[in-house]
């Protein structure tokens, strides 16, 4: 039962990227579609909002830019497999076959129920979470090494609990069973209406955001895409 939601999500992602890979080939004199996979975790993070997607689509009037949303792991796999041209993910991947460009930073926050004593804090630290259940951030797992290092530096062993669906996450918060680590996005407030959102002190848990693509890809659009994403993430 624990693994079924994860397997279903993987299956949906695989089918979607297979569909994208099979898109009809365009004529040689027509600029082909550029596909960007953008990290999206319904319970935790959305790196590009609707306005950002529209800005990307306006980059090249002669060329279609398609943005698809999946979790960071699926986005990265799609780049390696060649199903998409580039991916925007949380954290830097370790792959010799990819080029990475840092395009911004995403602020990490802790989500807790407003009735939780932690909600009275203005900022939070790993020490505050020493005895608190923390939702396992499998959907933003490329940010996990940074978060684990943060806990380790404070000599805190986090008590992770697995939450597979958005319903699991919202119920976890609404019933005040623990906290979540998410990214500071406007839509998070509507996802958890009874929650407080606490940034880590001194930005110590901020997660770098990277645009990644295959090393052999020299598409000229990548440079302009990098600059545009930097501007989009800076405005958030």
Image: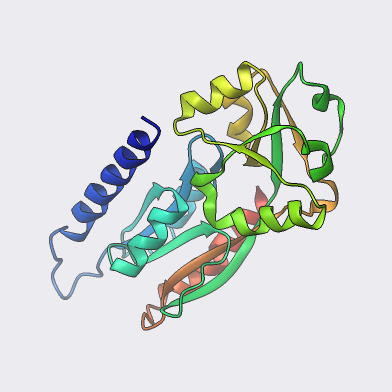
- Name the residue located 49 percent from the left edge and 53 percent from the top edge: 55
Asked whether 56 or 207 is in front, the reply is 207
Q: Position of residue 136 (x, y in %)?
A: 57, 41
- Name the residue located 37 percent from the left edge and 37 percent from the top edge: 3
Q: Is residue 61 visible?
A: no
As drawn, 174 above or below 102: above
Q: Position of residue 42 (x, y in %)?
A: 48, 36
Q: Is residue 9 visible?
A: yes
**Quadrant of the frame with the N terminus:** top left
Asked whether 137 or 219 is in front, the reply is 137
- Name the residue located 15 percent from the left edge and 66 percent from the top edge: 26
Asked whether 160 or 138 is in front, the reply is 160
Q: Position of residue 116 (x, y in %)?
A: 77, 20
Q: Position of residue 90 (x, y in %)?
A: 56, 56
Left of 4 or right of it: where is 222? right
Left of 125 or right of it: where is 160? left
Q: In the rendered view, how is the structure colored?
A: rainbow
As drawn, 229 above or below 8: below
Image quadrant of residue 102?
bottom right
- Name the residue located 53 percent from the left edge and 49 percent from the top edge: 140
Asked whether 66 or 117 is in front, the reply is 117
As drawn, 225 above or below 123: below
As drawn, 103 above or below 160: below
């Amino acid at each position: 039962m624990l693994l079924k939601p994860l397997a279903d999500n993987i299956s949906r992602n695989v089918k979607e990227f297979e569909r994208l890979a099979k898109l009809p080939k365009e004529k040689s004199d027509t600029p082909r579609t550029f596909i960007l996979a953008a990290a999206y975790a319904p319970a935790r993070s959305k790196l590009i909002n609707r306005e950002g997607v529209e800005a990307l689509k306006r980059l090249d009037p002669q060329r279609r830019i398609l943005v698809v949303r999946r979790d960071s792991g699926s986005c990265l796999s799609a780049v390696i497999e060649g199903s998409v041209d580039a991916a925007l993910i949380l954290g830097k991947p370790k792959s010799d076959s990819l080029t990475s460009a840092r395009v911004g930073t995403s602020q990490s926050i802790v989500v807790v129920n407003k009735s939780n004593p932690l909600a009275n804090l203005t900022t939070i630290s790993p020490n505050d979470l020493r005895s608190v259940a923390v939702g396992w951030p499998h959907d933003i797992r490329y940010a996990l090494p940074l978060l684990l290092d943060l806990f380790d530096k404070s000599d805190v062993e986090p008590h992770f609990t697995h939450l597979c669906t958005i319903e699991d996450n919202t119920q976890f918060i609404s019933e005040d069973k623990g906290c979540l680590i998410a990214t500071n996005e406007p839509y998070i407030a509507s996802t958890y209406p009874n929650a407080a959102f606490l940034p880590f002190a001194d930005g110590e848990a901020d997660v770098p955001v990277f645009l990644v693509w295959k090393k052999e890809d020299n598409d000229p659009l990548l440079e302009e895409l990098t600059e545009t994403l930097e501007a989009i993430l800076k405005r958030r």
